[in-house]
Amino acid sequence: MINCSPHIECCITSMESRANGRIVIGGSIVLPILCSTKDDVILNVSEGYVTKIEGSEEAVLFRDILKRAQEKEVYNIGEFGIGLNPLCKICGSMLEDEGVYGTIHFGIGDNHTMGGAVESSMHTDVVLKNPTVFIDGKIIIKSGEHLL
């Protein structure tokens, strides 16, 4: 068995209230009850916050967990990260899942401990497999393959 040093990622806090679009989670939602996702969970994002969660049973569970917190801040898009460790595998552990090479992740909720402005009772990482990522108009990851 290879022992993975899981915490190999590059991440930044988001610019609060600026994220818009859709996040299609096809990797994991790093919470004990969810872990690796079987079906896509779709997050609709407007002005930096998740406004709608769509999908199957996993989406319903995630929506219920966030709702139970009773805080607007748990819906904040607070972090963007890129996994850099080729030895890591999606397994439901936050440190390992967010480090998987060829994935990206978003932290939803609290980001004040990493330089952001939002404090919340939760920080949940959601991992996307095989993403295509553009930064400043350049593709840096295409279908999970790093180009730079």
Image (cartoon, rainbow, N blue to C red):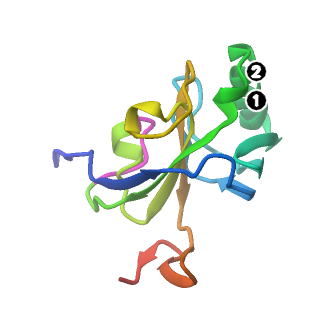
Image coordinates of residue 31 in percent, x first then y, are: 53, 28
The answer to if 93 sits in the magenta stretch is: yes
Q: Residue at x 70, y 30 (%)?
A: 62
The stretch in magenta equals: 88-94
Q: Quadrant of residue 36?
A: top right
What residue does disc 1 label? 63
Q: Does dot 1 land on a helix, a strand or a loop? A: helix
Q: What separation in Å lies between label 1 and label 2 (alpha carbons)?
A: 6 Å
- Say the numbered circle drawn on residue 67: 2
| Residue closest to the eye, 74 or 53 | 74
Q: Quadrant of residue 59?
A: top right
Q: Crowding at label 2, few (<14), some or many (≥20) Cα neighbours within 10 Å?
A: few
- Given the current orientation, which residue lies at the most extreme front position? 117
The answer to if 97 sits in the magenta stretch is: no
**Direction from residue 97 to residue 56 in the image, left or right:** right
Image coordinates of residue 96 in percent, x first then y, are: 34, 43
Kind of residue sitting beneath label 1: Arg
Q: Residue at x 54, y 79 (%)?
A: 136
Labelled pair 1, 2 in contact (Cβ < 8 Å): yes
**Direction from residue 127 to residue 113 in the image, left or right:** left
Q: Is residue 146 above or below residue 114?
A: below
